[in-house]
Amino acid sequence: MKVKMILPALAEAESPFWRPIKYSLFPPLGLATLASYLSSDDEVELVDQHVEKIKLDDSPDLVVIQVYITNAYRSYQIADHYRQQGTYVIMGGLHVTSLPDEASQHADSIFIGPGEEAFPQFLKEFRIGKPKKTYSSNVRTLTGIPPIRRDLIKRERYLVPNSIVVTRGCPHHCDFCYKDAFFEGGKSFYTQEVDDALSEIDRLPGRHLYFLDDHLLGHTRFATSLFEGMKGMNRVCQGAATIDSILRGNLIEKAAETGLRSLFVGFETFSPQNLKQSNKKQNLKKNYEEAVKRLHSLGIMINGSFVFGLDDDDQDVFKRTVDWGVANAITTSTYHILTPYPGTALYKSMEKQNRLTTNNWDLYDTRHVVYKTTKLTPEELKAGYDWSYKEFYSWTNILKGSLNHEVPKHQLKHFLYAGGWKKFEPLWNFIIKTKGLNQMLPLLEAILSKVKDKTQPIEHVSNSLISKPSISYEH
């Protein structure tokens, strides 16, 4: 059987604001995971339109398409093309789960939720000619899943080919989170077996790892065992976690010991009222500055995530957010305009209040205003969002943020990482086109490597933070 697995490019990946490196970071692990359930006799092709062109002049027996909200229209076009020539097309992903009725018009079968259970069942029924129209995930487990088909991934086309996911979902339920609806109908957060996760890590060449998990520290026992097993592997890694998990216990210290050098942190908003509106309880009454100090004391760089356009935001929110990020030496910032994704509690609430202004899914990219705002006009919100990116990543603020670290080597790392990420788009574009991204990995590993500060041992700093945790909300 000939199988073609496709990740269509997001609409914003080909917009005037396209930054090539952002869309050449990670391979499509979801599709590579599903491919592991195919037979060794099957002929499989994995195509990621972000890094290569899709050829539509072939005739596979089965096409598998992963759908996100801003590649939905492109996904439907590709699906319609293959169905017209008689190919069986299946679709899954976040958007399919959120709007199954819409997606089912363009697919022979659709998948609701995670696919580790549903896809093998589909394959059995497809091979005997009795596939169902809809498959959903009821049993949520990662026990015994086969190794990811990394042989299908074109490693040379990605900056971070060593991306990995060892958990599914998140223990928290923020109202604006797109993935919350994806895990309805079963466990919303579950982990691999530790030995399986360690085996997968051991398969990956080089030193660098990027954990794409929504919350790497979300299951304390699992994460503790994982980090213990990673000792001695000589890895440098990046991941994501919450303010609450950074301030609680000593799990972040264990992560740092095993090579965690960069963390995506969802600060999202300064306003307690906004946090309550978003059901982001894990950030309430937490001291953001204390979390930042703790991470910096461990040599962990921070990618801060911030959302603009929540109902308590006013015209000062943009400057306050940028100034706070610079003053607290946040290495990189990711800004978002609040976006009510279909299937989320936020979407349902805004739909009920008649606040949605468009259902053009191409605009649901966190860079456009798609709802009726309150204290800010749509024009003010969009302009403030654009200004924030430009201001935070100005050379002046990159230098200021760097100098707010106490250790000179951390200052240099901050400057190189922030500057290299945002200020050299033409160079990144050249490297991508010449297929030289893998050659940049040693530089990335060098920047992420541990800095030994002889003036103030990390153990002393981290222990002092543990013994005096702050519970005030000062962000």
Image: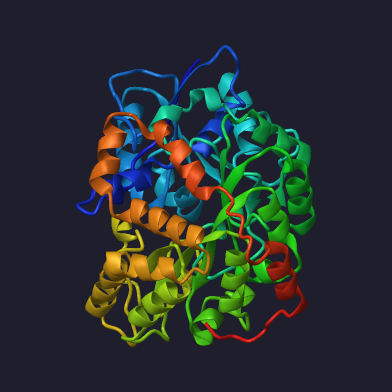
How far from the left and from the top, in percent, is residue 318?
A: 34, 78
Give the residue at the far top of this rendering. 41
How far from the left and from the top, in percent, is residue 274?
A: 49, 82
Q: Which quadrant would residue 135 be assigned to in this image?
A: top right
Name the one closer to the observer, 218 or 433: 433
Along the horizontal axis of the image, is 112 left or right of 460? left
Residue 386 lies, with reference to residue 19, above or below; the image says: below
Along the horizontal axis of the image, is 436 left or right of 208? left
The answer to whether any part of residue 12 appears in the image is: yes
Q: Residue at x 34, y 27 (%)?
A: 82
Residue 15 lies, with reference to residue 8, above or below; the image says: below
Residue 106 lies, with reference to residue 458, above or below; the image says: above
Coloring basis for residues: rainbow
Q: Which quadrant would residue 465 be assigned to in this image?
A: bottom right
Q: Residue at x 74, y 43 (%)?
A: 231
Name the one closer to the observer, 15 or 204: 204
